[in-house]
Amino acid sequence: MDFQNVESKDNYVLIKNIKNFELEHVFECGQCFRWNKTEQGTFIGVAFGKVIEVEKKDNNLVIYNTTEEEFNNIWLDYFNLRRDYKEIKEELSEDPLLKKSVDFGNGIRILKQEPFEILISFIISANNRIPMIKREINTISKKWGKEIKYKDDIYYTFPKVEDLQDKTIEDFEGCGVGFRAKYIKDTCEKVYASDNILEYIYSCDDDKCHIELQKFMGVGPKVADCIMLFSMEKYSAFPVDVWVKRAMMHFYVAPDVSLKKIREFGRDKFGNLSGFAQQYLFYYARENNINV
Ligand code: 8HG
């Protein structure tokens, strides 16, 4: 456990003595699209049909607009708080090349997000930039999600598959997703038609999960790796996008190595911690704009 205990207050919970958790690192490392920093330095996000606000105060984490019951049922796993990240970081830091990235993003944790939302989000992410991805997901949520008021603002949950299954390619194009509209439509239809398909894929082992996800339109090896890592607890995933490719070229491999080979190299090297290693590398490369 990366915290001591939980105290429940009026409209918030206090997670005492939180470890290995920095707000910027968690929410700005590239794994999520529905969190935004406020002027006060807290972050507000929408997940699991709820809006919460998160603040770090002294050694504690404060989660506003929630209850202890919700913490135990949702946020404990969402923030991956059962896992000891010190162990992960110690093991990865044995590699002096990786240590630099681990130190830089030392408060990263891999969120356990909702599979359907992450499936659609990472279809949108292909050949796209993070600010645009965020905007397009927000538009989809605004059109077909549920409204939630928090403080003086209105937020929108990411829609359920039931709310999207009857939408047309043109409907999705209207959200700015371009050529990905037909992939989203096809994927929504498939998920809606086949009962429990995402639960089934979740239950598969890592390699099978990677193969099954690629049966959805618009999901290639890289997008499949992101989906399984960010929503299905498959920590041997190693998504290789432009940033991870640059980081790997910077630290380990020759420039002419293919994405597939970089993925294999990473998974061989980092094993069941590949997904974590990838996240430290992605964050380091992107924040420092590394070029090779
Ligand atoms: O967390 C991420 N890891 C990797 N490897 N790629 C990511 C993450 N988040 C994210 O958006 N991407 C991809 O990077 C999507 C898109 O192709 C590009 C945006 O910088």
Image (cartoon, grey):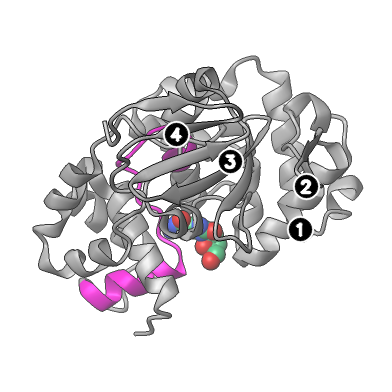
145 displayed left or right of 23: right
To which residue does mark 4 refer? 14
To which residue does mark 2 refer? 182
Residue 258's image quarter?
bottom left
Q: Hey, what amino acid is under mark 2?
A: Lys
Quadrant position of the C terminus in the picture: bottom left
Q: Residue furthest left?
A: 94
* Residues at marks 4 and 3 touching, judged by CB atoms closer than 8 Å: no
To which residue does mark 3 refer? 118
Classify mark 3: residues with Cα within 10 Å, few (<14), some (14-19) or many (20+).
many
Q: Name the residue: 79% across, 24% down.
A: 162
To which residue does mark 1 refer? 179
Whether residue 128 is visible to the viewer of this picture, yes or no, is no
Residue stretch rendered in magenta on the structure: 228-251
In depth, the one of 65 and 204 nearer the eye is 65
| Of pointers 2 and 4, the one earlier in the residue sequence | 4
| Of pointers 1 and 4, the one earlier in the residue sequence | 4
Q: Hey, what amino acid is under mark 1?
A: Phe
Q: Name the residue: 39% across, 30% down.
A: 208
